[in-house]
Image (cartoon, helix red, strand yellow):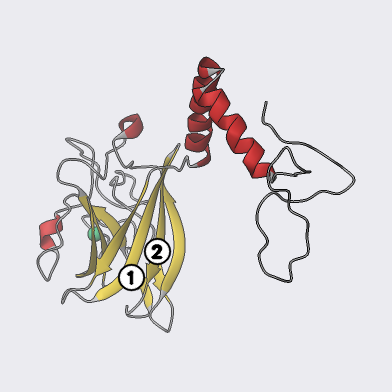
Amino acid sequence: MIGAIFNSARPQRCGRKHSKNDNRIFPKNRREGVCVFPLHFFSSILARKIVFGDYPMRGLLIATGLMLLSQLASADPAQLTAPVKGPDGADLGKIVLQEGPAGVLVHYDLHGLKPGWHGSHFHAKGDCSDPKFMNSGGHVAVANETLEHGFLNPKGTHSGDLPNIYVASDGTVLSDTFTTFVSLHGEKNRPGLLDTDGSALVIHENPDDYIHPPIGGAGARIACAVIK
Ligand SMILES: [Cu+2]
C-alpha cells in the first residue's frame, strides 16, 4: 500500500547523501534497495488516506473527535483581567476575576498602595473616569435591595461587599478572596458584574468595619478597576 520495503538487517534512509564523507548507502529508488521511512512519513500518508481517501466517513468522525478533545483540553472557566488605576491614572496592578460554580474568585496583584488595611467592594458601574471614582456608583446590589451594608450587619450585606485587603509594607498586595454574592454574567440569579454597564472594583482609603452603612467607614476611593 505504501510502497516501502522493510529490511531489518540494515535499515537505511531513502534520500541523498548529505556530504562527500557521508558513506551511508542510499538506494536510488525504493525498488533498488532497502528503505526505512520515518514514522511521521507513514502517519501522514495514513492520515491522508483516512481523511481524504478510502475512509472519508471515518475521517470525519476522527476529525470531529479531535476537535472535541481539543476543546475539552482548552476548557477554562470564564475569567477576566482588569487593570487597577489610581486617581491620577497611575498603574497600580491588576485584578483577575474567575467564575466558579458558586461565586467569583478575586485575585489581587497590586502595587503602589499605602500599607495597611483597605476596604474593597464591587461598585455598580464600570466607570473609573473621574479622579474620585464616584462615577462607579454605589455597591453592586440586587434589584430593589433593602439590605444595608457589611458582613456583620444584621440588616444584611450588599452583594458587592468584599473582605478588606492588606497592603504590605512595600505597597504590594498578592492575595485571593472569594464571594458567593455575585457572578460574572448573572449566573444563578446572582448580580452579574458584566451586566450592560459593567461594574468596578474600588479600593478605599480605610478598612471597612463590615457593619456601618453605607460603606463601613472605608473613606475615599483610592483605586479603581473597570470590569467590562
Ligand atoms: Cu466601596
> Residue 26 location in percent, x, y?
73, 53
Q: Which residue in the protein does label 2 denote?
A: 108
Mark 2 neighbour density, 10 Å: few (under 14) some (14–19) many (20 or more): some
Residue farthest along the bottom direction in this orientation: 170
Is 15 left, or right, of 103 in this rendering?
Answer: right
**Pick the front one: 36 or 131:** 36
Identify the secondary structure beneath mark 2. Answer: strand
Sequence-wise, which precedes: disc 2 or disc 1? 1
Q: What residue type is labelled 2?
A: Tyr
Q: Quadrant of ligand 1?
A: bottom left
Q: Where is residue 180 in the image (x, y as percent from the top left)?
A: 40, 42
Secondary structure at numbered mark 1 = strand
Q: Which amino acid does label 1 sit on?
A: Gly
User: Residue 192 versus residue 145: which sits nearer the camera?
Assistant: 192
Within-10-Å neighbours for mark 1: few <14, some 14–19, many 20+? many
- Residues 191 and 150: in front is 191
Q: Can residue 28 be seen in this view?
A: yes
Q: Which residue is drawn at 10% across and 58% down?
A: 135
Which of pointers 2 and 1 indicates the residue nearer the eye? 1
Q: Residue 138 carries which label?
A: none
* Residue in view at x 63 percent, y 36 percent: 43
Q: Mark 1 points at which residue?
A: 93
**Is residue 136 shown left or right of residue 39?**
left
Kindly indicate the quadrant of the structure image that contains residue 76. Answer: top left
